[in-house]
Image: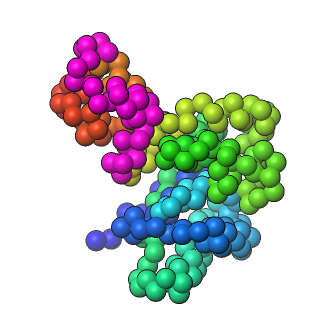
Amino acid sequence: MPHTARKKSESGYYHVVPKAIADQIIFENDADRRYYLELLDTSSADTGCELLAYCLMSNHVHLVVRDMFDALADFMKYANERYGMYLSDKTGRSGGIFRKPFWSEPILSDEHLLSCVRYVHANPTAAGICNPFEYDWSSAKDYLGRHGLTNTDMILDICGSIDSFIQFSNAMVGCARAFPGSKLIAHLTDDEVLRIAQLNLGKDMLRGMSSLSIQQRNDAIRQLKTAGLTVRQIVRVTGLGHRTVQNA
């Protein structure tokens, strides 16, 4: 089946998510992570694609990329194919490492750009690892002054200061959406959806949804919808009926 053509961003900004085939682990240690970042740095210099944010998780990567030369495909091809060869040589895996085509979504406005950077940095928090600014394998620390791969100027200019960026970043770290209306929500696994629901409601409330009053239950459902979960996802993690969730 032919792939759907990638939607072009009028702004030149994209949220990009290279993800492992069958959700396999692609970063086994810090040396692996450093090598992938080196590949991104080289590819950025070669293609002119600019990295505004990144986060390396165990089986996928989040990137915010500025592509003014229509070179996004080449940017990702260089990094992902070379990393795939490196991992194959190291582990003896056969075949590709990353899913093809890689997922991407145009970023539509400054508001969307800020929300997307916040979402990318919040991935370790959503996974229960640590606060965004405690994680070594994202660009969050670059925004505090660490020398890294990312161009932080534009985002900090929009926020006005590092302190304002920190305050913005610490809000809604459990939000599922890279920005309002993002289609990324459809790509979340059930485990990721469950973590988001637990972050928003707490484990006890999530388990006891069916025993809540109608008002409490509807308020909780609306909170999950605000976090970006779809009706179908809320049904799966709460056990409530589809019509109950839809009508809340």
The image quadrant that residue 220 belongs to is top left
Looking at the image, residue 104 sits to the left or right of residue 48; the answer is left
Q: Is residue 109 above or below residue 172?
A: below
Q: Nearer the viewer, residue 163 or 40?
A: 163
x and y, in percent, of residue 142 in the image: 75, 51
Quarter of the figure with the N terminus = bottom left
- The residue positioned 78% from the left and 44% from the top of the image is 144
Tell me if residue 38 is in the magenta stretch: no
- The residue positioned 74% from the left and 70% from the top of the image is 45
Q: Nearer the viewer, residue 185 or 146?
A: 146
- The residue positioned 57% from the left and 77% from the top of the image is 83
x and y, in percent, of residue 180 in the image: 48, 36
Determine the main secondary structure of the stretch shown in magenta. Answer: helix
Span highlighted in magenta in the image: 189-216
Looking at the image, residue 22 sits to the left or right of residue 149; the answer is left
Q: Is residue 154 visible?
A: no
- The residue positioned 33% from the left and 37% from the top of the image is 230
